[in-house]
Amino acid sequence: MTAATEATAVSAPDTVVGRSTVGALARAEIRYTARNPVLWLGVAASGLVAWWLATDGTFTGGKPVTDGYALWEWLVAPLALAAFLVGNWAALRERPSTTAELFTNTPARRWDRTLALLLAAVVPAVLGFLLIAGQWVAVVARGGVELGTGRWTSTFTPTPLELLGAPLGVACAFVSGVALARLVRSRAVGAVVGFVGWMIVWVTFWLWLTAPFGVFAVSRSSLVTAEIGTDPSAAEIARWAAVDPADGFNDQYVGGIRDLGVYGLHLVYVVGLVLVLAGVALARSGRDRRTRPVLLAGLVLVAVAVGVQFLVHEGARAWLGLM
Amino acid sequence: MSSPSTGWPALLAATGPVLPWGAVAAAGGAALAVTALPAVLPPEGDGVVLVLAVLVLASGCAVAGEDPAAREAGVAPVPVRRRLLARLLLVLPVSGAALAGMAGVAALAGTGPGSWLVPLWAAVSAIATAVGVAAQRSTPDVPGPVAAVVVLGGGLVLVATLPASVVGLPPWDSAVERVGWALVASALLLLAATRDPGARR
């Protein structure tokens, strides 16, 4: 290649490739992602967590309302870390961008390649769905999760809506790995930052059971809880599906009830977060008019989901209170 | 084969600029930030947050295991283990300074660090370094911190899910024994991963 043609190749205006090209790239990325051993290591570790949850009585014997169900999506935590690393790594395959532009065997731009990679989030999402579906079948087959104490006990049978949180959370981890790669071009730094994020979001799950953090959780259950005083009235207790009396850990009664409305808003928030992160990744991959709608849609969903949660769920406004 | 002409000052001076300090700084900064979290988060996680911060800090030490020149240069002009020691001599003081900062931040945040902090940091940093070296040896394309994060994250999940009957077995039912096992395992892995491939077996 002469200097003139090389300069032309580098400075050539962006061309929009057809959807079929992006589709072919996406299929290739999906294949690469599905073959990544780190992802399958995450699946194996998630399977171990699922086995642990199934055998230590988390979803069987009677549990306080703040336990058990809080770990509903926790089995996909290892898969989320693996998904982040795989996404980050895949996005940094083409670190020297000029070389990538010169030698790539497709006319697709960096923006199109990022879009194709983002679509590969479907792989960890499907794996997360299969894991949570297995847990759902096992829990439903056992008749649900019994929460509460004494006469204030209820059995909660997970609903199909609650199968969506885990795959969305894992997809969010993958997309955040890609977005971080477009912000910091270092796999080592990406791994460290991802490790911190994973531990805060997934490992310290109890932080997200309190307000206002619960509104911003990437993973949570549909159960909402609240402290209802040291001597609640019968009417107050009747508002809740399950209640725990005061004990050594809490000097107040704790009520719990499943709120699929709040959980649905949480899912909308996670979808918005995924779109925002995808928008950031695309914005950092070159100029394209299609980036703005993705970012705007994500920001609107996040704002609406967070705002409505604060409006409809009074527990969300109690600083460090249960929610 | 060692090189008598390459002294420690020259080796350290040559090693410093090529170390990926960005990852070490990111790990130290992130660990300090995590340590400060109890100031704003609910108290339930106070006991765990500092442990997680140490894990993050240790993952940065894995850059000491990254030695891209080892594959091409082998043991000449400086043996692999000597180069690793030089990298550790540069990385560990920075990581140790971050640990001291974490102890200060933890004290300010009201979650005063216990006497376990330094042994835990030593054990986890040893594991991270050994994993970084082993990853560099087996798959040169994998940065040390990435391999360390996979192993430390997996270990965290494993420790959390193992039955108490396994965690409490006599060989490792005390903190001292666990640190000892971690150091021994790391040393063995380091010895295996830094052996001279040309040496007689």
Image (cartoon, rainbow, N blue to C red):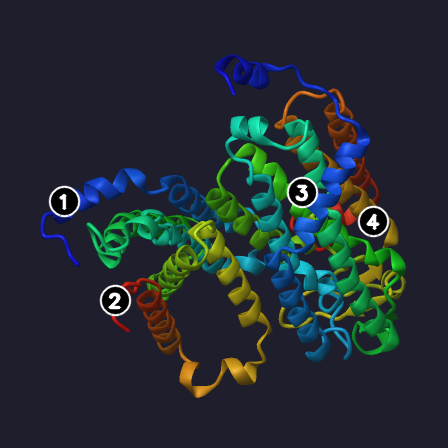
Q: Secondary structure at mark 1?
A: helix
Q: Chain of mark 2?
A: B
Residue B176 quadrant: bottom left
Amino acid type shown at disc 3: Val
Q: Nearer the viewer, mark 1 or mark 4?
A: 1
Residue lying at the far bottom in this picture: please name it. B170
Q: CA distance from mark 2 to mark 4?
A: 64 Å
Query: Which residue is denoted by mark 1 in the rendering?
Result: B9
Marks 1 and 4 close (CB-CB < 8 Å):
no
**Residue A5 image label:** none
Residue A5 quadrant: top right
**Residue A262 image label:** 4
Query: Which residue is denoted by mark 3 in the rendering?
Result: A175
Q: Is residue A292 above or below residue A39?
A: above
What residue is drawn where x is 63% and y is 28%?
A: A285
Amino acid type shown at disc 4: Val
Query: Which residue is denoted by mark 2 in the rendering?
Result: B199
Q: Secondary structure at mark 4?
A: helix
Tell me which label, 1 or 2, sits earlier in the chain: 1
Q: Is residue B122 above or below residue A307?
A: below
Q: Position of residue B14 (x, y in %)?
A: 22, 41
What residue is drawn where x is 82% and y is 72%?
A: A139
Q: Secondary structure at mark 3?
A: helix
Residue B75 quadrant: bottom left
Q: Position of residue A248 (x, y in %)?
A: 63, 72
The answer, for residue A192, to whether it is visible in the render is: yes
Q: Nearer the viewer, mark 3 or mark 2?
A: 2
Q: What is the crowding at mark 1: few (fewer than 14 residues within 10 Å), some, or many (at least 20)?
A: few
Q: Position of residue A207 (x, y in %)?
A: 63, 54
Q: Chain of mark 1?
A: B
Q: What is the crowding at mark 3: few (fewer than 14 residues within 10 Å), some, or many (at least 20)?
A: many
Amino acid type shown at disc 1: Pro
